[in-house]
Image: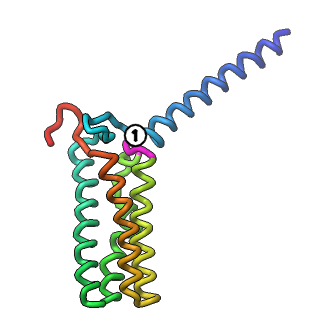
Amino acid sequence: MSANKNVVVYRVIIGLLLLTIVGLVLKFVVLGRTGTEVDGRVTILLEPSERAVVLNEMRQFLTGIQQMLEASERNDAAAIAKIARPLGMAAAHAVPAGLPAKLPLEFKTLGHGVHGDFDRIAMDAEAMDDVRLSLRQLGETMKKCVACHATYQIAPTSGSRR
């Protein structure tokens, strides 16, 4: 009898621990720190320094895209590869440790997709020397940028200044 009670208690404890773990994964991996804007976009709430990191990365993407377009005008696939490479997954590893936990899963998925796209653009530009292919790939990548900007806004946490 006593052994059966212990088994029940252990199962309840294990169940509660599993629920806690699932809740933490949901909070820190899937949802992030978010709110909702009047325009329907999801607001990602970040500390000012974290927000600066994300916005700086987006500016680097934009600058790289502009430079890649200029290189395409010169039909310079090698330059496209050189510009795209630092925007790839190597840049994704420079994110501060606590930041990913504050970002929604879909935002992280889009971001990793964009980094991966830049790696693919760089590799294909070097291997195939085809500027038109690079432009098509860049157009596909830009769809992810547009989707992200249509879905999310990065805002400082409450009480912080923009």
| Rendered location of residue 12, percent (x, y) | 68, 19
Q: Residue at x 50, y 34 (%)?
A: 24
Q: Residue at x 29, y 84 (%)?
A: 72
Where, by quadrant of the figure, is residue 76 drawn?
Answer: bottom left
Residue 45 vs 119, above or below: the answer is above
The segment highlighted magenta reads: 101-105
Where, by quadrant of the figure, is residue 69 drawn?
Answer: bottom left
Which quadrant: the N terminus? Answer: top right
- Under mark 1, the amino acid is Gly
Left or right position of 67 against 31: left
User: Helix or strand or loop: what does disc 1 sit on?
Assistant: loop
Q: Which residue is mark 1?
A: 32
Residue 71 vs 111, above or below: the answer is below
| Rendered location of residue 63, percent (x, y) | 22, 70
Residue 102 vs 83, above or below: the answer is above
Question: Residue 72 versus residue 95: which sits nearer the camera?
Answer: 72
Where, by quadrant of the figure, is residue 60 drawn?
Answer: bottom left
Q: Crowding at label 1, few (<14), some or many (≥20) Cα neighbours within 10 Å? A: many
Q: Main secondary structure of the magenta part?
A: helix
Residue 128 vs 36, above or below: the answer is below
Q: Residue at x 34, y 65 (%)?
A: 142
Q: How many marks?
A: 1
Left or right position of 102 against 17: left
In magenta stretch: residue 104: yes
